[in-house]
Amino acid sequence: MNFDLTDDQRKRYDEVFDGVRESLGAPSGPGAGAGGFTRDRWKEAARLGLVGLCIPGEYGGGGLGALDTALSLEAFGRGCPDTGLVFAVSAHLLACAVPIRDFAGEQVRADLLGGLASGELIAANAMTEDEAGSDVGTLATVAVRDGDDYVLDGEKSFASNAPVADVLVTYATTDPKAGYLGLTAFAGRTGRPGVTVGEPFDKMGLHGCQAGRVTFTGYRIPSSHLLGAEGTGAAVFQHSMGWERACLFAGYLGLMDRQLDACVEHARQRRQFGRHLGGFQAVSHRIAAMKQRLEAARLLLYRACWLLDQQRDHTLAVALAKVAASEAAVANSLDAVQIFGGSGFRTETGIEQHLRDSIPSTIFSGTSEVQRELVARELGL
């Protein structure tokens, strides 16, 4: 059992971290990460190769596996104070490019993957509906076959990247009587008749990733744009979620690394009652607990990605990693605010932004409750 990264992995991590820190902002600072999405910052992430990490090289991507993709996203999250941008890139890549890569026909792959890898195209995953969040087997959006096309009608309630997206990966019911076996996945373009994207939501955090509603009204998608076969949408979605749950949360590992560095530095410099904060056990033990959560999450996440790369059963490992990383991010962010005290509550330090960016991590990509249910099922309960 070898816990070392290879020389190539270390080099890639360092190159991504240095490039991100130089071009997308210092790791900390006043109001870090509080801004919104900009095309210029997206293009910069694309220049660094981040929007195409696991897209095959023949389409201009990095051709990386799950673990190497996660390591690059971890370096991205550590070097970039805009966790919303890290999330936006990860959603584009893992929830959209991955199912197109693995399930689209060659014509669609050729049409879309090059633009997704270069950053010319931005992708959004439109799955969630008002009455179908965790319960994705009850989609109200329907797709009806009409000749060589499918006609979609319905509304998606929360699609990350949608307000700026050029490509939509979406899911609809093609056989209402078949339950989750009646779902079908599609890849379509925005800016065509029948698709309307709403205004960006006002959100607690992740401001660098715009999200909004998507409404389909007689939206026609050629049958050639199916991802997989009709009725296999649930399998396509679970495949993409395996990649997302395993790799996306590496960005939060990076955030926690950056956060921990800030807390250690603050505890060394800040003095109260004639002593440095780090000299108080209440503070030093809190920081030790932050490190413990981070490293435990890191090991679980790396193992989940390794299993994914080995094409071995990864359901249990991915669920454990997702819970560990997301809940560690929230707990560590709460601790960071406490360690910084009043200054941690103020937006200018960027510390409270960590918490607001971390809170949704236990909700998206399957809630903590859903992940624990998956764990229980894998254990035979």
Image (cartoon, rainbow, N blue to C red):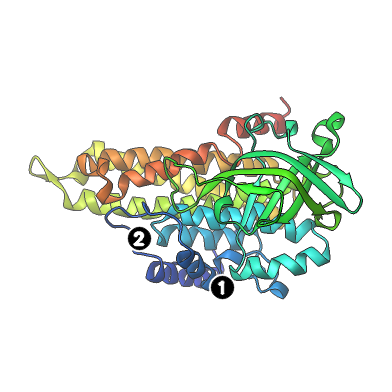
Which residue carries the number 1 mark?
A: 8
Quadrant in which residue 356 is drawn: top left
Give the percent coordinates (x, y) of residue 152: 77, 44
Of pointers 1 and 2, the one earlier in the residue sequence: 1
Q: What residue type is labelled 1?
A: Asp
Circle 1: element type: helix
Q: What residue type is labelled 2?
A: Pro
The residue furthest front is 193
Image depth: mark 1 or mark 2 in front: 2
State the CA–CA distance, disc 1 to disc 2: 24 Å
Residue 20 can be seen, yes or no? yes
Q: In this view, does 57 lie above or below 73?
A: below
> Which class describes the residues within 10 Å of circle 2: few (<14), some (14-19), or many (20+)?
many
> Which class describes the residues within 10 Å of circle 1: few (<14), some (14-19), or many (20+)?
few
Give the percent coordinates (x, y) of residue 159: 59, 45
Task: Name the residue at 49% across, 45% down.
Answer: 296
* Observer-nearest of 166 and 288: 166
Quadrant in which residue 38 is drawn: bottom left
Q: Do the residues labelled 1 and 2 touch (CB within 8 Å)?
A: no
Task: Name the residue at 58% across, 29% down.
Answer: 369
* Observer-nearest of 128 and 236: 128
Task: Name the residue at 51% across, 44% down.
Answer: 325
Residue 238 can be seen, yes or no? no
Give the position of the N terminus as an image quadrant.
bottom right
The residue furthest right is 147
Which residue carries the number 2 mark?
A: 27
Mark carried by residue 316:
none
